[in-house]
Image (cartoon, helix red, strand yellow):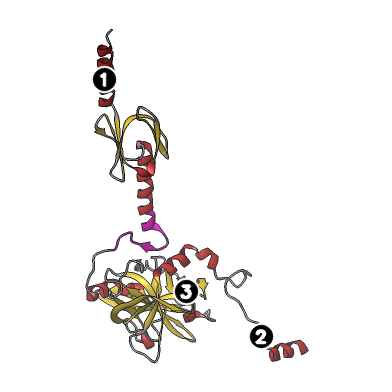
Amino acid sequence: MSKQSVLALAAAMCVSQLGRADTIELKDKASVTGKILIEKRDQVAVDVGYTVLLIPRNQIANISRSGNPVAPAVAPAATVKASTVVENKVTAVENTFYLAHGKSAPDQNVRDLVNQLGEAVVQVRTPGGLGSGFFLNPDGFLMTNFHVIEGETQISVEVYHQRGGQLEPKVYKDVRIVAINKFQDLALLKIEDKNTPKFQRVALGSADALAVGERVFAIGSPLGLERTVTEGILSTKTREMAGSLYLQTTAQINPGNSGGPLFNLAGEVVGITNMKITFGEGLGFAIPVEAVKFFLDHRDAFTYSNDNPSNPYRYLEPPSRTRKTLTSE
């Protein structure tokens, strides 16, 4: 065979092999053409003729075999597995202890939202004072501030039920303290009265997704004036006080608002109102909802029990004078 014939045959073989070559498109817009030797979970081995390249999966945008696109970056079995995980995650969000939307709903006006959320916001009363709260799920679990129920065990919750197009108040007196975090000023309660209905709940949103200047509103019982609505804007997301970050808002916050929800215009809770600067106006503060979610996700660690020596509630030693009196007796 002549030298020219050998070169022609080699060229024909190379062209034939190139026609059957696989193409891997990379995320940086480059591409690699060759024969895929093996596909692993974390990398793909490609024979490019003069060497074998190992390409990490996280750098691959798409794989085409002989010009036909196939599953991008992940093998088909892995893709199905990932889809299953995503579906389970969405389902879990809807069935967890609290409701948290993965994506915020469209904004609405405050008037319509107040009508929708009215049943979920409650008034929390103790012999020492009152505050506000809101339901997390239909089973009667609700959030409020720790300072609203601090040192108290006799707690009642006033709920407004929708009946015949009107809200009617009902007081529940069998209320249990489930978990507390005095350092974050958070408390989880549960209504345990018999024959209670399913309660209307609210969804938890994201304070991180808020932008300074966005409109927010609060519902609560300032000075005992139940179902009071105040509206304002988010003044800042990072107001530092005593080592913690708070949301600052121009929505009016007063004693009695404590423990109540601060909503965005999608009707989602973005914070729990807990304090204001008394000598100023429009200087209200709320605990970001991310701290609330963390507390709820780890509520077993904050369980309230007088019989549990590791529970977060601590009883202080009595004053020295009292201690001497008790010793002498």
Determine the CA span between mark 2 and mark 1.
96 Å
Q: Residue at x 35, y 27 (%)?
A: 49
Which one is earlier in the sequence, the residue at label 3 or at label 2?
3
Rendered view: 262 above or below 42: below
Determine if the magenta segment contains residue 96. yes
Rendered view: 34 above or below 266: above
The segment highlighted magenta reads 91-104
Q: Residues within 10 Å of mark 2 (few under 14, many from 20)?
A: few
Q: Secondary structure at mark 3?
A: strand
Q: Which residue is mark 2?
A: 318
Q: Quadrant of the C terminus?
A: bottom right
Spot occupied by residue 9 in the image (x, y as percentages of width and height):
26, 15
Spot occupied by residue 23 in the image (x, y as percentages of width and height):
29, 34
Q: Residue at x 37, y 57 (%)?
A: 93
Determine if the magenta segment contains residue 303. no
Q: Secondary structure at mark 2?
A: loop
Rendered view: 151 above or below 308: below
Q: Residues within 10 Å of mark 3 (few under 14, many from 20)?
A: many
Tell whether 252 sits left or right of 302.
left
Q: Residue furthest top?
A: 1
Q: Residue at x 53, y 68 (%)?
A: 302
Rendered view: 128 above or below 35: below
The reply to whether callout 3 and callout 2 are in contact (CB within 8 Å) is: no
Q: Quadrant of residue 13?
A: top left
Q: Which residue is mark 3?
A: 186
Q: Secondary structure at mark 1?
A: helix
Tell whether 293 sits left or right of 327.
left
Q: How many marks?
A: 3
Determine the CA span between mark 3 and mark 2.
26 Å
Which one is earlier in the sequence, the residue at label 2 or at label 1?
1
Q: Which residue is mark 1?
A: 11
